[in-house]
């Protein structure tokens, strides 16, 4: 028995695994590829050069793969790529990339994306993230693994959000948010580190202690980013188990532009 509802309009050139389920009145364009076990709800539009992996659950009324909201876009074959095991709730809009950047908007695996989330062109989302209702990403935003965005969080274009970071409801991000940092406000300000989230993810006491030391260097000692980076690098000798966490923080800070800076 076909898993595609008779009212759905699926272009005959589209590549859907035989196990893909498509709900009523959904429209799927010719350049779409959908992997095994994925379900598409009713009244969705999936268009453009869009690739969706395995075992995703996409609820009703989503728009995936539409052209970017970019006046410079002139019909180039840019892409939207979605990984595996993601949940996408109602009324989300994910646009394809733009030729001025990566030409691809990309979402990883195991993400939980709630209603009314917008991912603009050339955004990159990692794995195991949670985007609460109405989180909005402008173009070229990078969100690393295990990030949690509170409801109505708005992220300015080109901003980066480091792994394990978290925003409170209605936060406005105009600067990069380093790994592990919890922030809140309009504009957002750093409040603490995501210690409870790290404990739930199995971080050892030594690694959490190193995260506390990084927080102190960035936010409690009135240091420049360069000075804080030197202090953080010294943790490799003091807390060797935390070396991957220290390396991640230092790499993030190296990529932060002086004009944009970090959330303070």
Image: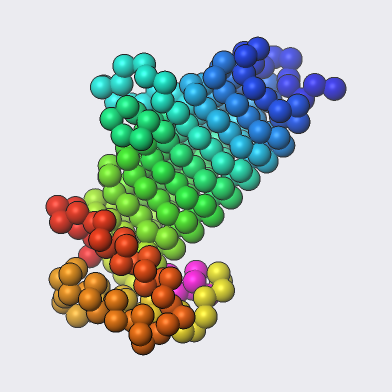
On whether residue 195 falls in the magenta region, the answer is yes
Q: Residue sitting at 66 percent across and 33 percent down?
A: 35
Report the residue that reaches farthest toward the right: 1
Residue 257 located left or right of residue 118: left
Q: Is residue 247 left or right of residue 130?
A: left
Quadrant, the N terminus: top right
Give the residue at x 49% y 84%: 205
Q: Is residue 64 left or right of residue 121?
A: right
Extreme residue in the bottom direction: 238
Pinpoint residue 53: horizontal percent, then vertical percent: 61, 37
What's the magenta region? 193-199
- Return the x and y of residue 97 as percentages of the image width and height: 38, 31
Return the x and y of residue 213 as percentages of the image width and height: 33, 81
Q: Is residue 258 above or below residue 242?
A: above
State the quadrant of the C terminus: bottom left
139 or 23: which is nearer to us? 139
């Amino acid at each position: 028995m076909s898993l595609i509802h008779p009212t759905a309009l699926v272009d005959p050139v589209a590549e859907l695994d035989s196990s893909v389920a498509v709900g009523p009145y959904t429209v799927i364009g010719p350049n779409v590829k959908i992997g095994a076990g994925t379900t598409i709800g009713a009244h969705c539009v999936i268009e453009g050069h869009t690739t969706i992996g395995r075992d995703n659950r996409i609820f009703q009324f989503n728009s995936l793969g539409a052209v970017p909201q970019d006046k410079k876009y002139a019909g180039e074959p840019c892409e939207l790529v979605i990984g595996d095991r993601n949940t996408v709730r109602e009324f989300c809009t994910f646009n394809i990339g733009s030729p001025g950047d990566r030409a691809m908007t990309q979402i990883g695996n195991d993400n939980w994306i709630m209603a009314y989330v917008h991912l603009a062109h050339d955004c990159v989302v990692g794995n195991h993230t949670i985007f609460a209702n109405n989180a909005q990403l402008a173009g070229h935003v990078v969100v690393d693994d295990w990030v949690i965005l509170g409801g109505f969080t708005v992220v300015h274009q080109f901003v980066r959000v480091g792994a394990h970071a978290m925003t409170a409801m209605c936060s406005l991000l105009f600067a990069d948010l380093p790994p592990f940092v919890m922030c809140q406000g309009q504009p957002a300000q750093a409040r603490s580190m995501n210690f409870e989230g790290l404990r739930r993810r199995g971080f050892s006491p030594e690694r959490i202690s190193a995260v506390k030391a990084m927080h102190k260097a960035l936010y409690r000692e009135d240091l420049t980013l360069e000075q804080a980076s030197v202090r953080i690098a010294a943790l490799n000798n003091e807390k060797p188990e935390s070396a991957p966490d220290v390396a991640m923080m230092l790499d993030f800070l190296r990529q932060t532009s002086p004009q944009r800076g970090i959330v303070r």
